[in-house]
Amino acid sequence: MMQVSPTTDAKALLEQIRNLQAQLEDRQGNLGAPLELEPNKSGFAEAIKSAVNEVNNLQMESKKTAGAYESGGDVSLTELMMKSQKSSIAFEATLQIRNKVLRAYEDIMNMPV
């Protein structure tokens, strides 16, 4: 199994931010022009909601598989462990992202103006 280091995640996130900034500058033409928001694009809140729903779906699927295994259904132990680990990793990743967002928010709020 490949492990992703926090610096790799940070580098990937930084690269995405730079790409978005470049796209934003291309759309604006110049930095003085007002930014026009496109209402049909999904925003940050929608992305977070989608990610939380995906984690919830993984956890519900893991519970169903565990229930089927316990009741003697046609579920292998390997399948049960894989789904359990997927849901656990997704939950831990969500917690880490939440912690980083909160830490960034606190840092921004503590900045002198």
Image (cartoon, rainbow, N blue to C red):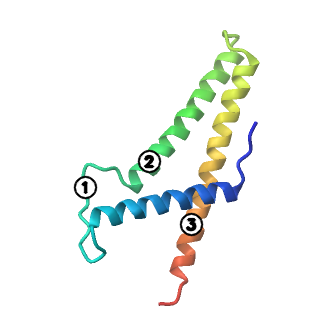
Q: Residues within 10 Å of mark 1 (few under 14, many from 20)?
A: few
Observer-nearest of 2 and 54:
2
Please, is residue 84 above or below residue 39 in the view?
Answer: above
Gap in angstroms between the C-alphas marked 2 and 3: 16 Å
Q: Position of residue 17 (x, y in %)?
A: 48, 61
Query: Upstream in the sequence, badge 2 or badge 1?
Result: 1
Gap in angstroms between the C-alphas marked 2 and 1: 19 Å
Find numbered disc 2 in the image and state the secondary structure of the residue it sits on. Answer: helix
Find numbered disc 1 in the image and state the secondary structure of the residue it sits on. Answer: loop
Identify which residue is drawn at 37% across, 59% down. 23
Give the residue type that dot 1 points to. Answer: Glu
Q: Relative to 86, is 47 on the left or the right? A: left
The image quadrant where one finds the N terminus is top right
Q: Do the numbered discs 2 and 1 sit on residues whose CB atoms are within 8 Å?
A: no
Identify which residue is drawn at 52% across, 77% down. 108
Give the residue type that dot 3 points to. Answer: Leu
**Circle 1 residue:** 38
Give the residue type that dot 2 points to. Answer: Lys
**Circle 3 residue:** 102
Q: Relative to 96, is 101 on the left or the right? A: left
Gap in angstroms between the C-alphas marked 1 and 3: 27 Å
Q: Position of residue 50 (x, y in %)?
A: 44, 44
Observer-nearest of 18 and 108:
18
Find numbered disc 3 in the image and state the secondary structure of the residue it sits on. Answer: helix
Mark toward the viewer: 2 or 1? 1
**Circle 2 residue:** 49
Observer-nearest of 41 and 62:
41
Q: Position of residue 57 (x, y in %)?
A: 52, 33
